[in-house]
Amino acid sequence: MITSLEGTLISATPLEAVLEIGGIGYEVHVPITTAEQLPQTGKTTKLYTHVVYREDSQTLYGFSSQDERDFFRTLIGKVSGVGPKVALSIMSKLALPVLKSAILNGDVVLLAKSPGIGKKTAERLVIELKDKIAPSAMGSSVDATSLPETTAVSAPENRINDAVIALTTLGYKLPDADKAVRKAHLQLGVEATTEELIKQALG
């Protein structure tokens, strides 16, 4: 199984990236939260991947960190009624720390805001995943010191997570902090520092 890809970013859209490796272009479906962190085309990029094999096709899904890739696998493997497309939609709407927090807190209303899922599916997410997400695991996903080794994609994610943590300590609710920081990230670009992201989000 292909568990990661590292190559030149040829093209990117909010839900798809094409990496060229050894003269071969790999089409990879990504959540918006990963697409936001991709560098400019022509740059080297690493994505952690999961492959879904069908009789007539094979589809690559890519993520900025191993944690996100593993959570995607959990969604499609443990939650009835959630396939790759729905899982990608859920992970496009909410960043991983927000998702885990919502599941741990049983926040069905927030989860149901993801395109493609309703209240019943949101409830299944909570019921079927709550026991599988330990509070320590949730903490590791937002603690910058515990994030995966920095890559061309994960470095911006480290700074985004740091900025989100900073806003929550200032009293922001986690979903609001995540939304504000990601908006700031889109405005400032992938090279923005944590301090710049915080300032832009607050401003």
Image: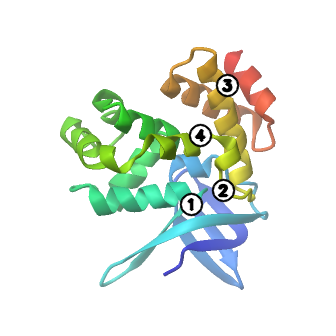
Q: Is residue 4 left or right of residue 158?
A: left
Distance of label 2 from label 1 (alpha carbons) = 7 Å
Distance of label 2 from label 4 (alpha carbons) = 11 Å
Q: Amino acid at mark 1?
A: Gln
Mark 1, other Cα within 10 Å: few <14 / some 14–19 / many ≥20: some
Identified at 33% across, 60% down, the residue is 76
Q: Amino acid at mark 4?
A: Val
**Label 2 belongs to which residue?**
148
Camera-nearest residue between 140 and 97? 140
Secondary structure of the residue carrying tag 2 is: loop
Displayed quadrant of residue 102 = top left
Secondary structure of the residue carrying tag 1 is: helix
**Label 3 belongs to which residue?**
166
The earlier-in-sequence mark between 4 and 1 is 1
Secondary structure of the residue carrying tag 4 is: helix
Res. 142 mark: 4
Do the CB atoms of the residues marked 2 and 3 lie less than 8 Å apart?
no
**Label 1 belongs to which residue?**
66
Location of residue 19 in the rendering, given as x and y in whole percent from the top left corner: 65, 71
Distance of label 4 from label 3 (alpha carbons) = 11 Å
